[in-house]
Amino acid sequence: MAKKIKRYFLTDENNQKLTELNCHDSTLGPDVLDVTPLYTDTGMLTYDPGFNSTASCKSKITFVDGEKGTLLYRGYEIDDLARNSNFLEVAYLLLEGELPDKKEFSEFEYSIRTHTMLNEQLHTFFNGFRRDAHPMAIMVGVVGALSAFYNDSTDFTDRKKRIITSRRLIAKMPTIAAMAYKYSIGQPFMYPNNALGYSENFLQMMFGTPCDPYKVNPSVAKALDNILILHADHEQNASTSTVRMAGSTGANPFACIASGIASLWGPAHGGANEAVIKMLKKIGDKKNIKGFIEDVKSHKTRLMGFGHRVYKNYDPRAKVIRESAHHVLKSMGRNDPLMELAMELEAIALKDEYFIERKLYPNVDFYSGIIFKAMGIPESMYTVIFSVARTVGWIAQWTEMYGDSDSKIARPRQLYIGKTERKYKKK
């Protein structure tokens, strides 16, 4: 039996039909009205600042239900993957659509391991930056520069070359991130150790030195792997939309990922976990929490790490990362005052009617900064690690966009409220 297409009609004040809009069914979430014929039929556009009510693409990758607090990667719940999987397995899932079998995972992992090194000439590229440059500035520059070193894989009309490029980016991002950190503190770069797993390798490149090899703590490596899984993709957020928009022009994938990193850098997006630590340090002591809460209510300051553009319930990623934070601190034998402060702040806020009414719950940024601090990772690197994780999602989204026959060059319209046409008069 043929599927019945739902149609909606837009009429004027005299009930005269202006246009006919088809409705696309979703497998989960709200159905979508196709407004493509609106301008042609009526001469009007839709107005939607921030794209709150606009679906810019079709996707099979990630689903977010903000009301229920649900996040699915290819249909799998995020906490299920975080507890049972690892980052590279999740990366394969996002890229290929299904979890890998043993042979597929072995081949994929080997491919990632063999692409971890950077061209030696890129090492000199870092010397062009000031030592105090923010690592995210370095990430934008170096990732964008990769296209100058891998001309053989910028012809992404070839599927095999798209796969090679995808794996190169996933493999090299931890290397670039660690080098950005090492450069900022004046230490020599550490080469990848391909005998280690993805997260273990990243940690040894961050904290190892030629004279004092870094011994990886399994609990820390597992926590980092969880963080990478939780941040791997999150539907059509600002940075992902930026990658898709850049990709719609035919830009090479290295440039597209660099544009995503630039978008992620913003404090309203990827920089929120850095802001949480600064907020907790500013509060300083549990006795100051009630006064801080009152300042939040009177809009004198902001409560960072609470609330989300999409989630109107407890962020499912926050539940997983909260457990990881406790586990890491326990395994390292640390009693972090900031962790105690965060828990007290969370307990008070969750019982306060002001926050309950506004559905302000802890998000993933609230605890990720505490884990990074326990690991010894500086605040300037928090968003960098976010970009390492999100690269997988960006590539998956870029690849999906490239294979979508409906995809067009992004060209949003506007509501013009400026001057009408006028003649030049010399003053």
Image (tube, rainbow, N blue to C red):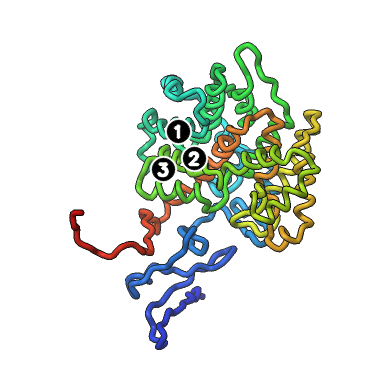
Vertical relation: 12 (above or below) 189: below
| Residue at 62% in and 41% down | 275
Residue 5: horizontal and vertical position, in percent? 48, 75
Q: Which residue occupies the foreground of this view, 366 or 175?
A: 366
Q: Nearer the viewer, mark 2 or mark 3?
A: 2
Counting residues from the N terminus, which is met first, the one under dot 1 or under dot 2? 1
Task: Find residue 159 and name its label.
Answer: 3
Q: Give coordinates of residue 65: x percent, y percent.
A: 63, 59
Task: Please give the label number shown on residue 261.
Answer: 2
> Which class describes the residues within 10 Å of circle 3: few (<14), some (14-19), or many (20+)?
few
Task: State the image quarter where residue 330 is shown.
Answer: top right
Looking at the image, which residue is at 45% across and 46% down? Answer: 243
Amino acid tagged 2: Ile
Q: Nearer the viewer, mark 3 or mark 1?
A: 1
Q: Earlier in the sequence, mark 2 or mark 3?
A: 3
Q: Quadrant of residue 149?
A: top left
Q: Answer whether labels 1 and 2 touch (C-beta < 8 Å).
A: yes
Residue 288 can be seen in this image? yes
Q: CA distance from mark 1 to mark 2?
A: 9 Å
Tell me the amino acid under the disc marked 3: Arg
Residue 24 picture location, percent across and down: 49, 68
Q: Residue furthest front?
A: 427
| Residue under the image location 67 percent in, 56 percent down | 298
Mark 3 vs mark 1, CA separation in Å: 21 Å
Residue flagged by tag 1: what amino acid is it? Answer: Val
Label number found at residue 143: 1
Residue 379 in percent (x, y) is at 62, 33
The answer to whether 371 is drawn above or below residue 211 in the figure is: below
